């Protein structure tokens, strides 16, 4: 027997328009984050960069983004969300322009640091807006719809940007991101409405971060999201090299591998979100975790499997990862109070950025190449990743119970107010 909390709530026209705007902003942010490593073959000779210098350039974004997000989390909820997002995204676009105009190592470093300072908090503000506009019963579908932006980046954005960088100059790829960003900036400026509900009750700035850090229920979300990111980054950091060297697919086939995964994610993400809203976010998360864990072990055991097996396994892996991200994101947004959500999300984003960098470094310590370039120790890496996935099941179950309790309490409070 279904209760009122399981009834599907349709999106309003404004909610749909808001999702389109946010998805567009996230698309440009994710594409910028993914682009530089993908065009390293063009950037390094053009700017005469050594491998260590290029490593500094890539890490500059994550370090500045994580640092700024931590600082930003102390005062994010003191501002109206739309104005804050427009200001932050303006800085992000200026950073993209700086990246496009960079003519040397130090100019590119400065541009990436500047981009990270603003880009590190764009997603947090966007997700905080989602938590304000969409109810828990809608949030799975909303998160699923936004996840399409990541898939589109993988299927269309990144291949197109790499194609442009290789056939013209690498800077042209950044000009394309800038153009798309300006388009969604203008749309957001006219479509988004101010969000001020979180401003009604505010603590002082100095106690904001302390309050977030000292709330035990928040740390279940932080720990879960960090563990999710570490597991994904550990396994995927060297996946392309593993597929080419160990599974004997060509570098050109990588576009097919990740393109197929992206298409599957686009098609499945809204369905996953809808299923989670109708049934249980935790159950869908658990199913996704099971699929992802099986694929991690399977892929690590493959040897010279060829393109078909790699496409199938990688697509199933990404589908499982999508289910985990969508469900954990929807549940996690229910935990913080309205007045904390902006700072909560920026703090969470900062932790994820920092831990992603640590995970990528750790992956390089665990796996290594032999004289023929084959990746060794991937089975060991897969065991670590599966163990981390198992830990997220515990965290997500706890978060699910807290989120359900919070939603039930809020509904009871609203019913009492209506009766009075």
Image (cartoon, rainbow, N blue to C red):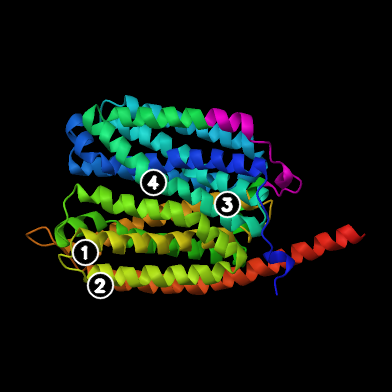
Nearer to the camera, 166 or 335: 166
Of pointers 3 and 2, the one earlier in the residue sequence: 3
Mark 4: secondary structure: helix
Query: Residue 367 shows which numbered tag?
Result: 1
Contact check, label 2 and label 1, Cβ < 8 Å: yes
Q: Residue at x 10, y 62 (%)?
A: 370
Give the magenta-colored segment's residue range: 185-204
- Gap between marks 4 and 2, in whole Å? 27 Å
Disc nearer the start of the sequence (4/1):
4
| Residue on which disc 4 sits | 62
Q: Report which residue position mark 3 lands on.
A: 142
In this rendering, would 277 be left or right of 230?
Answer: right
Q: Which residue is denoted by mark 2 in the rendering?
A: 380
Q: Which numbered disc flags the more N-terminal residue, 4 or 2?
A: 4
Q: CA distance from mark 1 to mark 3?
A: 37 Å
Which of the marked residues, 1 or 3, is nearer the chain's N terminus? 3
Tell me which numbered mark, 2 or 1, is placed earlier along the sequence. Answer: 1
* On screen, residue 362 above or below 103: below
The x, y position of residue 319, in whole percent, is 40, 61
Q: CA distance from mark 4 to mark 3?
A: 26 Å
């Amino acid at each position: 027997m279904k209760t009122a909390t399981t009834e599907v709530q349709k999106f309003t026209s404004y909610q749909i328009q808001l999702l389109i705007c946010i998805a567009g902003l996230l698309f440009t942010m994710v594409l910028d984050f993914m682009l530089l490593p993908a065009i390293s073959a063009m950037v390094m000779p053009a700017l005469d960069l050594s491998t260590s210098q290029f490593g500094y350039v890539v890490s500059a974004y994550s370090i500045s983004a994580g640092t700024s997000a931590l600082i930003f989390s102390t005062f994010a909820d003191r501002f109206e969300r739309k104005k804050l997002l427009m200001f932050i995204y303006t800085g992000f676009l200026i950073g993209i322009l700086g990246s496009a105009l960079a003519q040397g190592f130090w100019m590119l470093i400065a541009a990436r640091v500047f981009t990270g300072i603003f880009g590190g908090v764009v997603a947090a503000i966007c997700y905080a807006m989602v938590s304000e506009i969409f109810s828990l019963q809608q949030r799975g579908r909303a998160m699923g719809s936004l996840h399409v932006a990541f898939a589109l980046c993988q299927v269309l954005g990144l291949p197109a940007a790499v194609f442009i960088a290789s056939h013209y100059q690498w800077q042209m790829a950044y000009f394309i991101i800038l153009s798309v960003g300006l388009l969604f900036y203008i749309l957001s400026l006219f479509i988004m409405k101010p969000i001020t509900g979180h401003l009604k009750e505010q603590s002082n700035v100095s106690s904001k971060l302390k309050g977030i850090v000292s709330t035990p229920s928040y740390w279940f979300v932080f720990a879960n999201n960090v563990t999710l990111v570490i597991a994904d980054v550990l396994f995927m950091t060297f996946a392309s090299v593993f597929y080419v060297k160990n599974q004997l697919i060509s570098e050109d086939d990588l576009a097919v591998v990740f393109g197929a995964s992206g298409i599957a994610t686009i098609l499945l993400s809204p369905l996953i979100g809808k299923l989670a809203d109708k049934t249980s976010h935790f159950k869908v998360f658990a199913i996704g975790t099971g699929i992802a864990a099986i694929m991690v072990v399977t892929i690590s055991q493959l040897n010279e499997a060829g393109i078909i097996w790699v496409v199938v396994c990688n697509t199933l892996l990404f589908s499982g990862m999508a289910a985990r991200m969508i469900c954990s994101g929807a549940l996690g947004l229910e935990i913080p109070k309205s007045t904390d959500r902006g700072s909560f999300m920026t703090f969470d984003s900062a932790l994820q950025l920092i831990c992603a960098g640590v995970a990528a470094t750790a992956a390089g310590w665990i796996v290594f190449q032999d004289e023929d370039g084959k990746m060794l120790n991937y089975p060991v890496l897969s065991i670590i990743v599966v163990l981390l996935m198992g830990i997220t099941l515990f965290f997500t179950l706890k978060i699910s119970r807290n989120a359900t309790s919070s939603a039930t309490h809020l509904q009871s409070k609203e019913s009492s107010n209506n009766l009075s």
